Image (spheres, grey):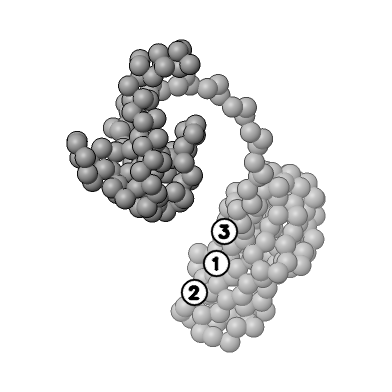
Amino acid sequence: MVPYFRKLMTRPWLAALMVGVIGAGAAGIVSAHGGDGTLIHGCVSQTGTPRGVVVVYSAPGLPGSEPPTSVCGTRGQALDWGVAGAAGPSGPVGATGPSGIVGPSGATGPSGPSGPAVPGGGASMITGGSGSGISGDYGPGVQTGVADTSNGGFIVPVAGTVSDLTFLEDLGGAAGDYTITIFRAPGIAGTGTATLLSCRSSVAAIAQRSCTDHVNSVVFAQDDKLIFHLIQNGGGTRVVHWAVKFTPS
């Protein structure tokens, strides 16, 4: 008992708490509380000297305290408050920390797929024409009439495909009727033979006659000979122009 009494003497607040608890029980239980077991329950003295003394009779974890459903004495006013205080304001934002070290470089990713081929990429045009009407051989590699296709023409420097034949007559003079055909001869000294790449200007019944062949094409090996073979079937004589597209392999 003596050690417990000494503890009360060294802790006055604990002695006051115990006295308040005992006093509340002796005064009689009249003033009601809400019965919340998480709150501290006390009684405020309305009489006596000094007035306003708070006596705690029930608190969470307080040994020997009354149940939270008890009431104060006739001279006390019930007072409840929470164990934890209200949350304080947020503190200031802390300073930004230092940057971390740079990580190692990642591995090289795989190569992407090849892009689509560009239409007409690397292609060029081979063109020719007559200077003053059809009366002989005009332009590079041209044979007119029933030509000796072992002569004339020009050498294809690299392998490729010839396509998109176009033919056009100038205005002026009577309209002509022409057939133009691409001949291919194997090698420099070879004799040319007709290919399917051909068109006839008479199919266009207009003043400025023309024809095209965008359907057929001819494959040429390196050093093959290409010949524009032109025949005038009838009609007048005009200045004419022709062209083909050459796409290297």
Mark 2 surroundings within 10 Å by alpha-carbon count, few (fewer than 14), some (14 through 19), many (20 or more):
some
Depth order, front residue of 4/13: 4
Task: Give, as a three-letter code, the residue at label 1.
Answer: His
Up the image or down, 25 lies above or below 12; here it is: below
Badge 2 is on which residue? 170
Depth order, front residue of 115/49: 49
Task: Give, as a three-letter code, the residue at label 3.
Answer: Thr
Task: Give, as a three-letter code, the residue at label 2.
Answer: Asp
Badge 1 is on which residue? 241
Is label 3 in contact with label 1 (beta carbons under 8 Å)?
A: yes
Is label 2 in contact with label 1 (beta carbons under 8 Å)?
A: yes
Helix, strand or loop status at disc 1? strand
Label 3 vs label 1: CA separation? 8 Å
Up the image or down, 181 lies above or below 99; here it is: below
Numbered circle sitting on residue 127: 3
Residue at 33% of width from left, 38% of height from top?
55
Instruction: Say whether disc 2 or disc 3 marks the residue closer to the N-terminus.
Output: 3
Is label 2 in contact with label 3 (beta carbons under 8 Å)?
A: no
Query: In this orientation, does residue 87 appear?
Result: no
Give the left or right position of residue 247, taking residue 102 as reference: right
